[in-house]
Amino acid sequence: MRVRKKDEGVLEGDLTPMIDMTFQLIAFFMVLVNFSDAEQDQRIKLPSSELAKPPDAPFEEPRYLQLTKDDTVLFAGDEVGVDALEPVLQREKAV
């Protein structure tokens, strides 16, 4: 014959570690949200540089450099060889 143990009651788990972890996660995400606002402000501020400023006088007329399907290079509407392109651009830069 089997001997039955008396029912000692329902075992309850300790919820303290789970509650502690919940509050730690809440605190972590609150800190994370504050840092993301600071990073967002930094991304908006652009560094200042002399090179980033627009020129004092606007260009007289724009110069266009075009490369066609048949590998022809056109600068300001004139056909320019690939070898002669660098001197032409240097001359325009000096002007």
Image: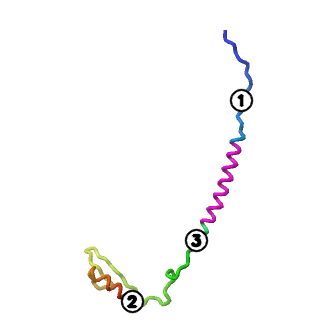
Q: Quadrant of residue 64?
A: bottom left
For marks 3 and 1, the one nearer the N-term is: 1
Dot 1 alpha-carbon crowd within 10 angstroms: few under 14, some 14 to 19, many 20 or more: few
For marks 3 and 2, the one nearer the N-term is: 3
Residue behind mark 1: 11
Which of 50/59 is in front? 50
**Residue 31: x percent and y percent?**
66, 57
Which label sits in the foreground, 3 or 2?
A: 2
The disc at residue 73 is none
- In this rendering, position of residue 43 left or right of residue 67: right
Amino acid type at mark 3: Ile
- Kindly state the secondary structure of the residue where label 3 is placed: helix
Which label sits in the foreground, 1 or 2?
A: 2
**Who's the residue at 74% across and 23% down the image?**
8
Amino acid type at mark 2: Ala
Q: CA distance from mark 3 to mark 2?
A: 35 Å
- Magenta span dominant secondary structure: helix
**Who's the residue at 68% across and 49% down the image?**
24
Q: CA distance from mark 1 to mark 2?
A: 88 Å
Quadrant occupied by the N terminus: top right
Dot 3 alpha-carbon crowd within 10 angstroms: few under 14, some 14 to 19, many 20 or more: few
For marks 1 and 2, the one nearer the N-term is: 1
The stretch of residues the image draws in magenta is: 18-39
- Kindly state the secondary structure of the residue where label 1 is placed: loop
Q: CA distance from mark 3 to mark 1?
A: 56 Å
The disc at residue 44 is 3
Residue behind mark 2: 94
Which of 29/74 is in front? 29
Quadrant occupied by the C terminus: bottom left
- In this rendering, position of residue 56 left or right of residue 68: right
